[in-house]
């Protein structure tokens, strides 16, 4: 792909981004509930960033990246802080955006009193229940969904080693879901994980979690497929849609909850930029093709603030917008997939148009 072609695609992306036909608007018209992004209060001082975040046609849902995690909300036992996630909710309310809430029981970003505690099943269970009751209760009515249990599986599909699994085995999962259901009966309750998208043993493990919860009469509403991919290594549109179908066939909804597609090395070549656009289009297209996929969340929309460079050495430029908040070829590819789906929905009379809303706190 030549430089002129890249320039033309970038121009198309820019035109789409400022036309009012943003990704959320296109997603809703295609029959999905949202196209959203992660954010948090540490970014709210960047006016250029906020100008994009506040475009509700672009993003109809936001997710607090870190401020609802255990170490942020309950660093000291029974002392809760909600200042930052309340501020994210305030932005969502002002914009008429939904909020997806993240994450309750997770092995990482735990306060010291949890990770280093000396626990028995009898002492750890009420700590989990109290944390979830307080956090979910504080946001009752405000969250479209909660990631109740996050990343509980190892790559081979067995339970990941964590303070929770060491003390409680798999029982921390139903404990968490029961507590969340009691605290907010209206919120959708999700299991969320990475590398479920490939139909692997880890996918099988997540299917097992769903089956165990259902067999025990514990409510689970959805599975989040995180979608952290390297350019050229994302699943095909067809393969990912089949994986989504394995979960929706169980009566669940699914969502792409943390999507990004990183270049393994920078600067990226023109061919790599084209492949990234193709990967994004295929992944979002799988959601389009799956009736039970309710929407897409990108794990940051701008390369300026992506988590990737700090985690994957030498990698980066994983987002739909560049560091100057300009849409990239990948943006145009996603917009094209959603536009095609919107046209198809209009043709068969199934267009859904609505504005997201939030309540609660």
Image (tube, rainbow, N blue to C red):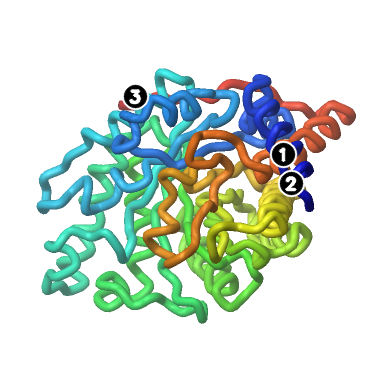
| Mark identifier at residue 7 | 1
In this view, the residue in front, 74 or 91, is 91
Q: Is residue 203 left or right of residue 240?
A: left
The residue tagged with tag 3: helix, strand or loop?
A: helix
Question: Can residue 88 be seen at all in this image of the molecule?
Answer: yes
Q: Nearer the viewer, mark 3 or mark 1?
A: 1
Locate the C terminus by quadrant: top left
Q: Position of residue 206 (x, y in %)?
A: 53, 68
Q: Is residue 222 visible?
A: no
Label 3, residues with CA under 10 Å away: few <14, some 14-19, many ≥20: some
The answer to which of 140 and 319 lies nearer the viewer is 319
Q: Which residue is mark 3?
A: 90
Q: Marks 2/1: CA distance?
A: 6 Å
Answer whether labels 2 and 1 touch (C-beta < 8 Å): yes
Residue drawn at point x = 66 percent, y = 36 percent? 32
Q: Position of residue 252 (x, y in %)?
A: 60, 52
The circle on residue 3 is 2
Which residue is found at the position 71% from the left and 26% from the top?
A: 352
């Amino acid at each position: 792909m030549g430089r002129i072609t890249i320039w033309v695609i970038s121009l198309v992306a820019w035109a789409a981004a400022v036309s009012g036909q943003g990704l959320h608007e296109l997603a809703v018209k295609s029959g999905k509930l949202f196209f959203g992004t992660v954010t948090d209060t540490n970014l709210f001082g960047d006016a250029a960033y906020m100008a994009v975040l506040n475009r509700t046609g672009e993003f109809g849902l936001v997710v607090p990246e870190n401020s609802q995690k255990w170490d942020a909300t309950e660093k000291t036992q029974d002392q809760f802080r909600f200042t930052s996630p309340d501020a994210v909710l305030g932005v969502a309310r002002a914009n008429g955006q939904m909020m997806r809430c993240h994450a309750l029981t997770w092995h990482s970003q735990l306060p010291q009193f949890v990770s280093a505690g000396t626990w028995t099943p009898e002492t750890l269970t009420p700590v989990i229940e109290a944390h979830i009751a307080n956090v979910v209760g504080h946001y009752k009515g405000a969250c479209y969904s909660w990631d109740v249990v996050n990343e509980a599986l190892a790559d081979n599909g067995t339970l990941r080693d964590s303070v929770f699994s060491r003390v409680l085995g798999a029982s921390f999962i139903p404990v968490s879901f029961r507590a969340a259901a009691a605290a907010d009966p209206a919120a959708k309750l999700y299991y969320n994980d990475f590398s479920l998208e490939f139909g692997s043993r880890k996918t099988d493990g997540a299917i097992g979690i769903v089956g165990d919860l259902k067999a025990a009469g514990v409510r689970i509403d959805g599975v989040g497929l995180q979608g952290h991919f390297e350019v050229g290594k994302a699943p095909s549109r067809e393969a990912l849609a089949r994986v989504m179908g394995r979960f929706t066939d169980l009566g669940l909804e699914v969502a792409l909850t943390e999507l990004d597609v990183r270049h393994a090395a920078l600067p990226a070549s023109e061919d790599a930029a084209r492949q990234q656009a193709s990967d994004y289009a295929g992944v979002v297209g799988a959601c389009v093709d799956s009736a039970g996929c309710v929407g897409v969340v990108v794990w940051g929309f701008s390369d300026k603030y992506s988590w990737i460079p700090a985690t994957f050495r030498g990698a980066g430029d994983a987002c739909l917008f560049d560091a100057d908040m300009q849409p990239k070829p990948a943006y145009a590819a996603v917009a094209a997939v959603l536009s095609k789906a919107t046209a198809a929905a209009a043709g068969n009379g199934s267009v859904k148009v609505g504005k997201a809303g939030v309540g609660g706190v």
